[in-house]
Image (cartoon, grey):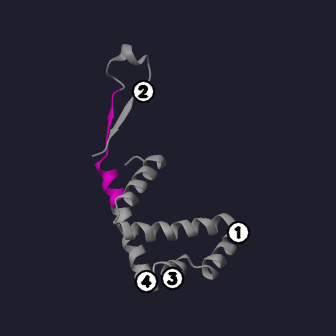
Amino acid sequence: MNSVNPVLVQIFYRSAIANMPEKKREIYQYITTREEELEKIAVSEKQFMELMVNHSPFKEASSYFSLSLSAIKEIMDEAQAEIDLMIMTRINQMRWINYSKTDRKARKNKKWTFVFVS
């Protein structure tokens, strides 16, 4: 299988998040936003890990959404599994069609490829 364009994967990722139930999406986005904020301020991997322990996005989400830490972890695991499944399903549904050999006069030696995703 050819590698999939990372931009296309990002489109599928955003689509998967947008299609989640509202509460799950809010929790997922809350935690991922907090993780990204910590990543931006960390100067090393070690510092990032320390920040993740000292300012745990999961603990913050637990407090913010008034849910137990185990419930937050379960929701995040479910959300990530759903996202992964949706992305893989969309990738497997892609069909590449090469139009390079059709209508040569109109293309003037350019290569054209289209992707259809259902």
Tell me the residue that label 1 is attached to. 44
Q: CA distance from mark 2 to mark 4?
A: 53 Å
Identify the residue shown where x is 40% and y is 83%: 71
- Closer to viewer: mark 2 or mark 3: 3
In this view of the protein, which residue sits in the foreground, 65 or 109?
65
Provide residue 67's location: percent of width, then percent of height: 43, 83
Marks 3 and 1 close (CB-CB < 8 Å): no
Tell me, yes or no, if residue 39 can be seen here: yes
The image quarter in which residue 17 lies: bottom left
Amino acid type of the residue tagged 3 in the rendering: Ser
- Closer to viewer: mark 3 or mark 1: 3
Amino acid type of the residue tagged 1 in the rendering: Ser
**Residue 48, placed above or below residue 88:** below
Q: CA distance from mark 2 to mark 3?
A: 54 Å
- Closer to viewer: mark 1 or mark 4: 4
Tell me the residue that label 2 is attached to. 111
SS at badge 1: loop
Confirm whether the magenta stretch covers residue 90. yes
In this view of the protein, which residue sits in the foreground, 52 or 103?
52
Q: CA distance from mark 2 to mark 1?
A: 43 Å
Q: CA distance from mark 3 to mark 1?
A: 27 Å
**Residue 16, placed above or below residue 118:** below
Identify the residue shown where x is 32% and y is 52%: 90
SS at badge 4: loop
Marks 2 and 4 close (CB-CB < 8 Å): no
The tag on residue 63 is: 3
SS at badge 3: helix
Amino acid type of the residue tagged 2 in the rendering: Lys
Amino acid type of the residue tagged 4 in the rendering: Leu
Tell me, yes or no, if residue 5 can be seen here: no
Tell me the residue that label 4 is attached to. 67
The image quarter in which residue 96 lies: top left
